[in-house]
Image: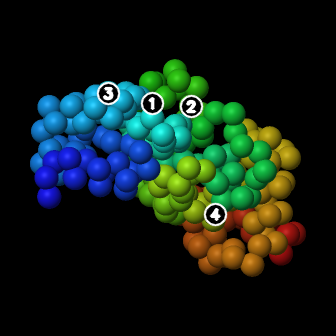
Amino acid sequence: MDEKNILDKLLEEHNGYIRLIDAQNEGVSKYTVMEYVRKNEMEKLAPGVYISSDAWEDRLYLLQLRNRKIVFSHESALYMHNLSDREPFSPVITVGRGYNAKHLKDNGVVVHTVRSEWLELGLTHAQTFTGNTVRIYDRERCICDIIKNKNKMDIQVFQMALTSYFTDGDKNIHNLMKYSEIMGISDKVRQYAEVLL
């Protein structure tokens, strides 16, 4: 496959985005990528990240492309899982302790920090509104996170998320309890489960 075809394929697979590093990993030279970007009148969104003129800009996906270790959580994850009808004004993410998130906070991202061993607990993938795949916590981890951080949550978002989760047929109480044990909040989670189930 020639370099142009590789770039066409990457562009299609990533919904109009190309990362320089992905192209280089496929054996395409930086010069060829820059020429492709210029010929196709693509816009530079960040160092090494380009978008075609007919693609929708996706802030969450761009955040994920630039910060591979972040996980969308709390209000952002609740909204993507349809456990909240309020899209957060700022993206909400979780990172492991020791991750330098100053650049994210400076750009209006709400950052939660957890123990490194909890970072991948309940990790899954979901699609943003434009169909791009990002790292996100599953529904059970989201419920544990909001119960653990209840005092920092909007009470209406909190109540809607719990009610939506516990009345949904797709809930996984086994995973919910497993996560809550690991996170040291099993008593609190059990209290909510007893009231709402």
In the rendered structure, are the residues bearing label 3 and label 1 in contact, judged by CB atoms less than 8 Å apart?
no
Q: Find the distance from the CA under tag 2 to the CA under tag 1.
A: 9 Å
Which residue matches tag 4? 139
First in residue order: circle 1 vs circle 4: 1
Image disc number at residue 109: 2
- Mark 4: few/some/many CA within 10 Å (<14, 14-19, 20+): many
Going by the numbered disc 2, the residue's amino acid type is Val
Nearest the viewer among 69 and 181 is 69
Element class at badge 2: loop
Q: Are marks 2 and 1 in contact (CB under 8 Å)?
A: yes
Residue 93 place in picture, x, y as percent: 54, 42
In this rendering, is residue 100 above or below 141?
above
Quickly name the residue at label 1.
101
User: Within 10 Å of the Cα at label 1, are there few (<14), some (14-19), or many (20+) other Cα atoms?
Assistant: some
Q: Is residue 149 left or right of residue 44?
A: right
Q: Name which residue lies at 49% across and 52% down.
A: 132
Q: CA distance from mark 4 to mark 3?
A: 33 Å
Kindly report which numbered mark, 4 or 3, lies closer to the viewer in this rendering. Answer: 3
Q: Give yes or no for contact between labels 4 and 3 (Cβ–Cβ under 8 Å).
A: no
Mark 4 falls on what kind of element?
helix
Mark in front: 3 vs 2: 3
